Every structure is written in structure tokens, then in C-alpha cells.
Image (tube, rainbow, N blue to C red):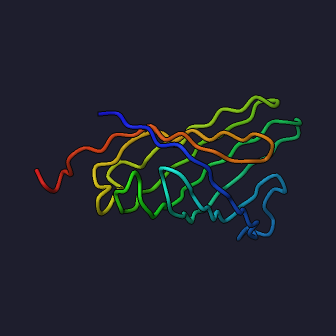
Amino acid sequence: MRNQANGTFEVKLVPQSLENATADAMLGRMTIDKQFHGDLEGNSKGSMLTAGTSVPGSAGYVAIERVAGSLHGRKGSFTLQHTGTMTRGTPQLTVSVVPDSGTGELQGLSGSFTIQIESGKHSYQFDYTLEESINSI
């Protein structure tokens, strides 16, 4: 059965130094710290890698974040994987649950996470399924 969770979140991105000091200035690395509210209550920690280009409005990023909290009252944790590109100002973003990353009452979680940003405020729509854990079959 498909479920949907909605709410808001605050995010703090902190730039980190790259290990290779001779790295291209267009590359970046950041830590992610989020607080979720709504149907998903909790927080996440993660890492992001970014790549800018010489063309304004074109860039890319990948990220992994570990979310811990409760989803519609079910407690546990799971991992989200991000892949994002911006082509001359047109964004394309995919955020999905890493297979078999759910723990606790969130074992068997799968789904996709949509992020909206309006007037600087972040919100999410999380379309997900919770299947019986493979460990309990």
C-alpha cells in the first residue's frame, strides 16, 4: 500500500575542505544537518558532493543522509540518496530510500522524497511503502 507523508524541514549545510588541495575550484563538499516536522518527525545527518560549471545555472550534486525519527508514528531510521542536476537553471532531482536501509519499525521502507522550496522555506512530500521485513519472512 502506497502512503504519503508531508511536512517541512530546516537544513543546515556546512562547507568542508576537500582532501586534495589541488582539486578544481568548481568542486565542493558539505555536511548536511536537517530537522524534519510533520508526518516525518526527526533529524538527519549526511554528506554532499557538488560540482559547479562555467555556465551560470548549471551544476550537479550527490548526497547521502541518514534519517532517524518517526514516520506516521513508526520509529526507526533509513537512508536517503540524492542525485541532482541543474541545467541552465532547470532543476532535476531524485531522492530515494536506499533499499533495505530501514531499521526498527521502518524495516522494509522504500519510496521517493520530493523537496519543494518556496520563499526560502523547505517542504517535502514522501511517497513510500512499508513492506514486511525480509528478516521476518
Residue 4 in the image, given as x and y percentages of width and height: 44, 38
Q: Across the whole image, how many numbered discs are drawn on residues?
A: 0
**In percent of the image, x 34 and y 48: which residue is there?**
109
Extreme residue toward the left, this view: 137
Image-quadrant location for residue 135: bottom left
**In percent of the image, x 84 and y 57: which residue is there?**
25
**In percent of the image, x 68 and y 59: which residue is there?**
11
| Nearer-the-camera pick, 87 or 101 | 101
Q: Is residue 77 above or below residue 123?
A: below
Residue 83 in the image, given as x and y percentages of width and height: 59, 42
Image-quadrant location for residue 104: bottom left
Residue 93 in the image, given as x and y percentages of width and height: 62, 37
Q: Is residue 100 left or right of residue 10?
A: left
Q: Is residue 24 left or right of residue 9?
A: right
| Nearer-the-camera pick, 7 or 79 | 7
Residue 38 in the image, given as x and y percentages of width and height: 53, 51
Q: Is residue 113 left or right of residue 17?
A: left
| Nearer-the-camera pick, 11 or 20 | 11
Q: Is residue 67 above or below residue 116?
A: below
**In percent of the image, x 76 and y 70: which residue is there?**
17
| Quarter of the rendering occupied by the N terminus | top left
